[in-house]
Image: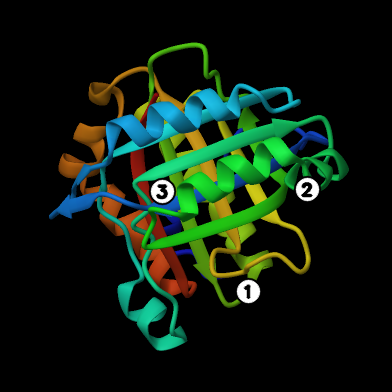
Amino acid sequence: MKLINDHLAVKARVLPPTGDGFLMLAGEVGSWRGPFASPPVQLAAHLKALAAGSEAREGNVFRAVLRPPGEGDELLAARGIRPARFDVVVLIRTASVEAALELRESAAYKELAQTLRAVARRTHEIVASNAGRLGDVDHSQDHCFLFNYFYADDRETLLKVWQYTAGWFQAKTALPNSALMQPLEGEPADYGLVNHASWPNWRTFLPSLIFRPTFRSFVLANFKANGIAAQPIIYRQV
């Protein structure tokens, strides 16, 4: 791992990973105008109703709003990986990865997945474990939710760099939580990690991404130096 501007480096205050399992289904359905998304409202509401029938700890549906600055378009192109432009995401959390694998085979989930696949130009589905966390993401509040789709040639390097970039977000945006989802062996590996997190409102994080020079000179620079593509998208919960 290389650290650029290491005088700015502070490791994140992390908590032990949980044994939770995650079943994530993301789709490209609506349209994008630059960084702004226009996802279908009725579809998202229908998916929410279907997700409510899943036997899991929680099931949530998200509609994309905005793509903040990221890094790695050239890396993705070189590896033949399509950029993440998912404007609808279903995230189901289970008590274990085994429970998530079992849930994927259930009739209720298959109906949900088919509903999204029938209208999406592209979908991405994974069962994942928890690879790291800053805190549990609270879905009971109307917050701004992040899904950051990471690609790296080396996942271990990605995990190490994340500890420092997450530390920047804790220090500069008061990031209260984060759950790193790592696809199980055999799952699609376009994105080696997907980071899920939230902030209470836009002003807690967005100005820092636009106006703080260290977001580019430290966060984005370290992604680039370590061969990491970071593709963040901000969502609101349905």
- SS for tag 3? helix
Q: CA distance from mark 3 to mark 1?
A: 23 Å
In the image, residue 177 above or below residue 158? above
Amino acid tagged 2: Glu
Residue at the image point whose x is 76% and y is 32% from the top: 94
Give the residue type that dot 3 points to: Leu
125 left or right, relative to 79:
right
Task: Check the image and report above or below for 52 versus 102.
Answer: above
Q: Is residue 83 above or below residue 215?
A: below
Q: Residue at x 47, y 75 (%)?
A: 227
Q: Quadrant of residue 231?
A: bottom left
Q: Is residue 1 above or below residue 220?
A: below
The picture quadrant where one finds residue 185 is: bottom right
Residue on which disc 1 sits: 154
Q: Position of residue 106 (x, y in %)?
A: 77, 41
Quadrant containing the N terminus is bottom right
| Disc 2: CA contacts within 10 A as few (<14), some (14-19) or many (>=20) | few
Q: Which structural element holds mark 1? A: loop
Residue sitting at x 74%, y 26%: 56
Tell which circle, 2 or 3, labels the residue nearer the N-terminal end. 3
Q: CA distance from mark 2 to mark 3?
A: 46 Å
Task: Tell whether 33 sits left or right of 95.
Answer: left
Q: Which mark is residue 105?
A: 2
Judge whether residue 70 can be spotted in this image: yes
- The residue sitting at 25% across, 25% down in the picture is 202
Which residue reaches farthest bottom? 78
Q: Residue 60's spot in the image, x, y percent?
A: 53, 28
Q: Earlier in the sequence, mark 3 or mark 1?
A: 3
Residue pointed to by mark 3: 8
Mark 2 lies on a secondary structure that is loop
Measured from the top left, where is residue 93 in percent x and y? Answer: 69, 32
